[in-house]
Amino acid sequence: AQKITQTQPGMFVQEKEAVTLDCTYDTSDQSYGLFWYKQPSSGEMIFLIYQGSYDEQNATEGRYSLNFQKARKSANLVISASQLGDSAMYFCAMRAWNGNKLVFGAGTILRVKS
Amino acid sequence: GAVVSQHPSRVICKSGTSVKIECRSLDFQATTMFWYRQFPKQSLMLMATSNEGSKATYEQGVEKDKFLINHASLTLSTLTVTSAHPEDSSFYICSAPPGRYNSPLHFGNGTRLTVT
């Protein structure tokens, strides 16, 4: 069975600084995908970044980067130059190669301070 | 990009009534749709998977008779909360799988249900 663990219920970051949101996972699959989503108070799920288990390079998308350490089974999200609009709930999720279901972590509430 | 339209976005109903939530794939065909439930400040929990032309697959602990799921066509999946009670108040969100494995799921914008 797959499991995603996010150990930070809440995080604060000063505007313009970088922040790392932790995510560890557990799976017996060799091939899988890791996703990060942002959920603002409106409730919509906004896709941020994807990392495949066989990708050798860490994924980057603008101010978002994923620190993927396969041996440690961690996929931390790094947000650089935080903005007030980054305040939201962030979810790490996993999908097996042979399935479509997403398994979500508990989420981390990020608050950006001005 | 692919869009999933979910309606209504908010609904308030009285205890004992039924509420139907619709998810439509606007520019693609979705043979499968996932239905999630989310309590405030908690994670998304998969309730069931709807499949076009066949019965939905429910996750363990989800009452099939309470949450009726129908996948009537390749573009429409519905969730009906029957005989709703205040404890059914929650945020419900649907999602459809992408065409490619490494692409993100397409999510609807969610429905906030309040049962009074």
Image (spheres, helix red, strand yellow):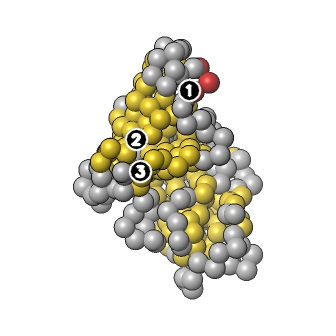
Residue at horizontal 54 percent and vertical 32 percent from the top = B65
> Which of marks 3 and 2 precedes in the sequence?
3
Outermost residue to the bottom: A56
Q: Measuring from the top left, give residue B33's x and y in whole percent.
A: 42, 51
Residue that mark 1 sits on:
B89
Label 1–label 3 contact, CB within 8 A = no
> Which of marks 3 and 1 precedes in the sequence?
3
User: Do marks 2 and 1 both belong to one polypeptide chain?
Assistant: yes
Amino acid type of the residue that numbered disc 2 sits on in the rendered structure: Asn
Residue at horizontal 52 percent and vertical 49 percent from the top = B57
Going by the image, does A19 lie left or right of B96?
A: right
Q: Measuring from the top left, give residue B14's x and y in whole percent.
A: 49, 14
Res A94 visible? yes
Amino acid type of the residue that numbered disc 1 sits on in the rendered structure: Ser
Question: Which element type, helix, strand or loop, lies under badge 2?
Answer: strand
Q: Badge 2 local density, few (<14 within 10 Å), some, or many (20+)?
A: many
Q: Quadrant of residue B99?
A: bottom left
Q: Nearer the viewer, residue B81 or A34?
A: B81
Res B96 visible? no
Disc 1 versus disc 3: distance between alpha carbons?
Answer: 28 Å
Residue at horizontal 45 percent and vertical 47 percent from the top = B55
Residue that mark 2 sits on:
B70
Q: Chain of mark 1?
A: B
Q: Measuring from the top left, give residue B96's x and y in whole percent.
A: 41, 54
Q: Measuring from the top left, give residue B70's x and y in whole percent.
A: 40, 41
Q: Quadrant of residue B61?
A: top right
Q: Chain of mark 3?
A: B
Disc 2 versus disc 1: distance between alpha carbons?
Answer: 20 Å
Q: Is residue B70 above or below residue A98?
A: above
Disc 2 versus disc 3: distance between alpha carbons?
Answer: 9 Å
Residue that mark 3 sits on:
B54
